[in-house]
Image (cartoon, rainbow, N blue to C red):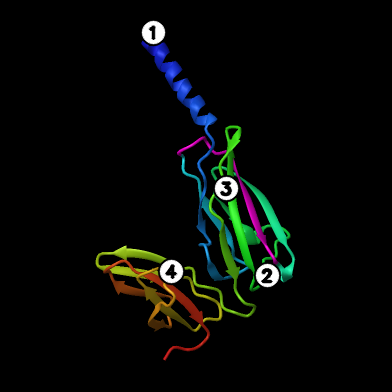
Amino acid sequence: MNRLILIFAVLACALALFADPPADPILISPADGATGIDPNNVTLVWQTPLTGGMPSYSYVLIWGYPGGTYTSYVYYVNYPDQELDLSAQPGVDLGYSVNWMWAVMVYGGGSQSNWGDTFNFTTMAEGALPSPQVTITASGIFIFLDWPDVPGANSYLVYGADDPYAANFTFLSNRAVSNVAYIAGTKKFFKVVASSETPN
């Protein structure tokens, strides 16, 4: 009898899981308000918390006004994939100096999540250097910033701020190499800009 009750309890839990809508997705990258994005290297990344029904696929919507004309792209991405190499999709032209919006809705178990947040990013100006894709790691008392070399860059300007929304980041250093280390302290946010100029 106890085994039968346990089976029914597990079945009830499974049915409840699939009856609930999936959790709202969390957008990750490109970050909201990101600028200087290389239009030939854009990958959308999001995450669906497993706090609701089991996801089946994601509905991804991207829209903008290149050349003043409304343009949108729609994709379906099967779970567990939670990223889309947008630049590699056939027919996609993100252009230069164009602001794009993107959002994700998740489907599963016969229902759907709400739209998550809407993020926007702006592609770089034509002829500009792409923004370095910075990775931050910690080891001991040091914080390490590292990024792949940017074609055409001769130096990298590193800025920092205590607030990620600060109007002005403080200039920290001008680097000829694609890495830098700082002594860890209070939380700080960094920004790295590629430059064609040779550092002093």
x and y percentages locating residue 58 in the rendered image = 59, 45
Indicate which disc, 4 or 2, sits on the residue closer to the N terminus.
2
Alpha carbon separation for disc pair 4 and 3:
24 Å
N-term-proximal mark, 1 vs 3: 1
Residue 115's disc is: 3
Kindly identify the amino acid type of the residue bearing the numbered disc 3: Trp
Q: In front of the other: label 1 or label 4?
A: 4
Quadrant housing the C terminus: bottom left
The span shown in magenta is: 51-65
Assess disc 4: are there few (<14), some (14-19) or many (≥20) residues with their C-alpha within 10 Å of its C-alpha.
few
Tag on residue 1? 1
Q: Give neighbour class at mark 2: few <14, some 14-19, many 20+ (Cα, 10 Å).
A: some
Q: For the view shown, which residue lies furthest in the bottom direction?
A: 200
Q: Which mark is residue 136?
A: none
Question: Marks 2 and 3: CB-CB under 8 Å?
Answer: no
56 drawn magenta = yes
Question: Mark 1 or mark 3, which is nearer to you?
Answer: 3
At mark 2, the secondary structure is: loop
Give me the residue at 49% from left, 72% from top: 132
Give the numbered dot on residue 95: 2
At x 53%, y 85%, the residue is 196
* Magenta span includes 71: no
Between the residue at mark 4 and the residue at mark 2, the CA separation in whole angstroms equals 26 Å
